[in-house]
Image (tube, helix red, strand yellow):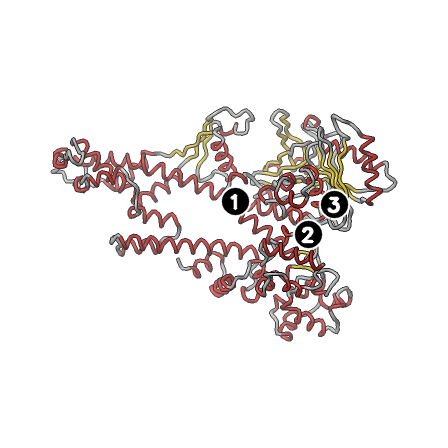
């Protein structure tokens, strides 16, 4: 497969761009670095296109390596022909390659190989001549051989049929015919395997859907039901129709051998072809479903990571609970833990006054000015308590309900243990909640993206591929936001372009030993951080209160362009807060100055943007839902209620909304809007505040149906 032409056509970019990107990747450049700082070379290809490029490039490389292996194998067997070579060179997918190679692929011992060892290949060839003058049973007499364990005529015929069956099964055109027929006309059928007490798979107890139309989320749901032994799954097609097509292609005339060949074809279909292709098609459906799910997962994760930080606040992390008490953690503006504790204001203890005294004392001692309340068990009861407490203070303290998803994973992780070895798991969760409010990105990178709780069926997917995809999202967001070099944890630093896990630890060790970095050039003093790593990471790292350009996304390699531009405008880097300068930069003719300064226009545009808003943070402010305080449990809601909630998760089929009753409600895609909705992501985003109407409640199954469009109406 021609790498250059294929990538050019698939991604709709020029061959020059393809060559340029391959060259940059071969030089060891990262995708974030190429996307941001090599726009002139790539024609301004963005991060998303470059990641698709890299994925396809790796696939094509693997394809070409496999092609070479197959060609070598068939050639060594002395079976290569012009026809086979042309077929291999025209193949476009791994499936096509493997179909062509199948007849020549070394096999373990099979019924056909045993029959060949018994010398029954000539009988097979006789059968396939369809000679009307030959009686097969008479012909088979010649092959009876006690030494080779061919004891009867039936043994000989069965062996010849086994060889025919394997040859039919290995024929690429037959596999393609049946595969296409399965995709076009096949149906996925599910039946109950064992009772499902929770009713999770009720709709699939007796279910059929066309292979060509089945929705990705239903494929994943069916797979999970099968894995949990709740469902039996099969693929059904019109066997007689597809068999008739193969028989017509193999059997040349009606004669004595035709009935034996027909039996062999039936055996090939039932024993070899159908089970193999059924697995193949279900695997392909699963792969496509996973790809679709990953797109949703990626967007959800991106939105979650891009929630704006709450800066310059001393925060009380409040992890709610009933029996074990609510865990508290006070953290300063930089996330340092100042104090911890436990209070018991909820059932069954109800030590409300004692809890108030404890928290008021913490507020007075540490100057707490915001509370991060987890949204898990006892959240609504704790919120009621906090509202009452705040009303008794002589000043207002804000509180925000923070999504706890993944906090427990971090708390029990080796990283959580390393950070807070003397804290129990629940106290670590309280710290994580407070820090998650202060800087969601810095805290969420400590958690495996798969555990953050956005997406669908993430535990059923190819974990390696999912990890790579989500890791790419985190990397992309971290580098687009930028990282404070003097406060970032190793967990955050290792997502920065060019910085490995060990290098991230080296940076933190250097910082602890030598104090804060004064400028980006100091990075070169870090052990094992050489010129290439510096080139890749420097532009994404920020140093506040130092050289002004070090707090921007302007790369050190372009500082002289920024300085020269400012000089042209009769200003310096110390004037970046000057409003007159910003006005000049807004109105500049980029192309004219690009020629004057001998710099690419895309690079100059990025420099200007950074000079206008130095240290800017692209993250979005989080909204806070006003929840009804008479609704704190699923038993409190009824059909017809209109509530306010927060979008917590987005799926292909709808949106899960937190309405504060410990169980998210589902707004099905059909209930999102009165207008046509192709995908929920087109209408809502993670953490969006929405008004919803309750349209169904099932207390036993803990299912809540919601509608947004009925509120619109």
Q: Quadrant of the C terminus?
A: top right
Name the spot of residue 639 as percent of width and height, x first.
67, 28
Measure the alpha-carbon separation of dots 1 and 2. 26 Å
Residue located beneath label 1 in the image = 292
Residue placed most toward the observer, 596 or 120: 120
Q: Is residue 31 above or below residue 298?
A: below
Decide which of 602, 401 is in the foreground and name it: 401
Q: Which mark is residue 329?
A: none
Q: Is residue 300 left or right of residue 101?
A: right
Which of the labelled discs sits on residue 619, or is there none? 2
Element carrying mark 2: loop
Closer to the chain start, of discs 3 and 1, is 1
| Badge nearest the viewer, 1 or 2 | 2
Residue at horizontal 59 percent and vertical 44 percent from the top: 448
Does residue 505 appear to the left or right of 156 in the view shown?
right
Question: x, y (%) of residue 260?
Answer: 21, 34
Instruction: Judge whether residue 711 can be spotted in this image.
Output: no
Question: How far separated are the C-alphas under marks 3 and 2?
Answer: 25 Å
Look at discs 3 and 2 and give the one toward the viewer.
3
Q: Is residue 713 above or below residue 42?
A: above
Secondary structure beneath label 3: strand
The reply to whether the C-beta atoms of the residues labelled 1 and 2 are less than 8 Å apart is: no
Q: Residue 337: which numbered mark, if any?
A: 3
């Amino acid at each position: 497969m021609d790498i250059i032409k294929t990538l050019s056509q698939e991604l709709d970019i020029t061959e020059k761009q393809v060559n340029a990107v391959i060259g940059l990747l071969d030089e060891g450049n990262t995708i974030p670095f190429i996307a941001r700082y090599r726009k002139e070379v790539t024609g301004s290809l963005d991060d998303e296109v470059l990641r698709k490029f890299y994925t396809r490039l790796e696939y094509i490389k693997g394809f070409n390596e496999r092609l070479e292996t197959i060609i070598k194998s068939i050639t060594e067997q002395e079976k290569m022909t012009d026809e086979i070579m042309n077929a291999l060179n025209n193949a476009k997918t791994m499936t096509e390659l493997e179909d062509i190679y199948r007849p020549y692929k070394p096999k373990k011992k099979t019924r056909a190989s045993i029959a060949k060892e018994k010398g029954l290949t000539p009988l097979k060839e006789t059968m396939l001549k369809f000679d009307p003058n030959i009686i097969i049973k008479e012909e088979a007499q010649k092959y009876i051989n006690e030494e080779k364990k061919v004891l009867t005529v039936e043994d000989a015929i069965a062996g010849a049929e086994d060889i025919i069956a394997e040859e039919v099964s290995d024929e690429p055109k037959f596999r393609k015919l049946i595969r296409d027929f399965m995709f076009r006309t096949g149906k996925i059928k599910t039946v109950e395997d064992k009772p499902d007490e929770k009713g999770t798979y009720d709709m699939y107890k007796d279910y059929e859907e066309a292979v060509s139309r089945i929705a990705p989320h239903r494929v994943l749901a069916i797979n999970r039901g099968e894995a949990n032994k709740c469902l039996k799954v099969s693929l059904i097609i019109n066997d007689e129709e597809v068999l008739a097509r193969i028989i017509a292609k193999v059997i040349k005339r009606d004669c004595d051998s035709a009935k034996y060949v027909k039996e062999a074809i039936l055996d090939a279909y039932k024993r070899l072809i159908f089970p193999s292709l059924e697995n193949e098609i279900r695997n392909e459906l699963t792969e496509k479903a996973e790809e679709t799910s990953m797109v949703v997962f990626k967007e959800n994760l991106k939105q979650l990571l891009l929630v704006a930080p709450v800066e310059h606040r001393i925060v009380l992390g409040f992890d709610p609970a009933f029996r074990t008490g609510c865990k508290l953690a006070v953290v300063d503006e930089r996330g340092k833990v100042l104090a911890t504790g436990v209070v018991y204001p909820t059932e069954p203890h109800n030590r409300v006054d004692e809890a108030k005294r404890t928290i008021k004392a913490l507020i007075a001692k540490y100057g707490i000015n915001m509370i991060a309340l987890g949204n898990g068990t006892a959240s609504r009861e704790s919120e009621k308590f906090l509202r009452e407490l705040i009303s008794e203070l002589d000043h207002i303290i804000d509180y925000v309900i923070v999504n706890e998803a993944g906090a427990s994973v971090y708390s029990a992780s080796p990283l959580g243990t390393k950070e807070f070895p003397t804290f129990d798991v629940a106290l670590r969760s309280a710290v994580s909640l407070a820090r998650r409010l202060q800087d969601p990105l810095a805290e969420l990178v400590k958690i495996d993206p798969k555990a953050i709780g956005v997406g669908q069926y993430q535990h059923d997917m190819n974990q390696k591929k999912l990890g790579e995809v989500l890791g790419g999202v985190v990397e992309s967001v971290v580098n687009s936001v930028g990282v404070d070099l003097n406060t970032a944890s190793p967990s955050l630093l290792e997502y920065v372009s060019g910085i490995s896990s060990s290098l991230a630890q080296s940076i933190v060790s250097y910082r602890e030993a030598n104090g804060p970095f004064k400028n980006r050039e100091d990075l070169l003093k870090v052990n094992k951080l050489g010129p290439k790593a510096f080139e890749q990471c420097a532009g994404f790292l920020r140093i506040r209160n130092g050289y002004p350009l070090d707090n921007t996304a302007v790369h050190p390699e372009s500082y002289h362009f920024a300085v020269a531009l400012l000089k042209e405008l009769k200003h310096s880097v110390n004037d970046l807060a000057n409003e007159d300068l910003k006005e000049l930069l807004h109105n500049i003719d980029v192309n004219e100055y690009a020629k004057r300064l001998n710099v690419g226009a895309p690079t100059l545009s990025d420099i200007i943007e950074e000079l206008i808003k130095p240290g800017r943070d692209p993250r979005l402010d989080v909204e806070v839902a006003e929840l009804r305080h008479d609704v704190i449990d699923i038993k409190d809601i009824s059909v017809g209620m209109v509530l306010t909630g927060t979008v917590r998760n987005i799926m292909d089929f709808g949106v899960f909304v937190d309405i504060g009753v410990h169980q998210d409600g589902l707004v099905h895609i059909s209930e999102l809007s009165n207008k046509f909705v192709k995908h929920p992501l087109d209408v809502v985003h993670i953490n969006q505040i929405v008004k919803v109407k309750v349209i169904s409640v099932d207390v036993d199954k803990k299912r809540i149906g919601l509608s947004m469009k009925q509120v619109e109406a």
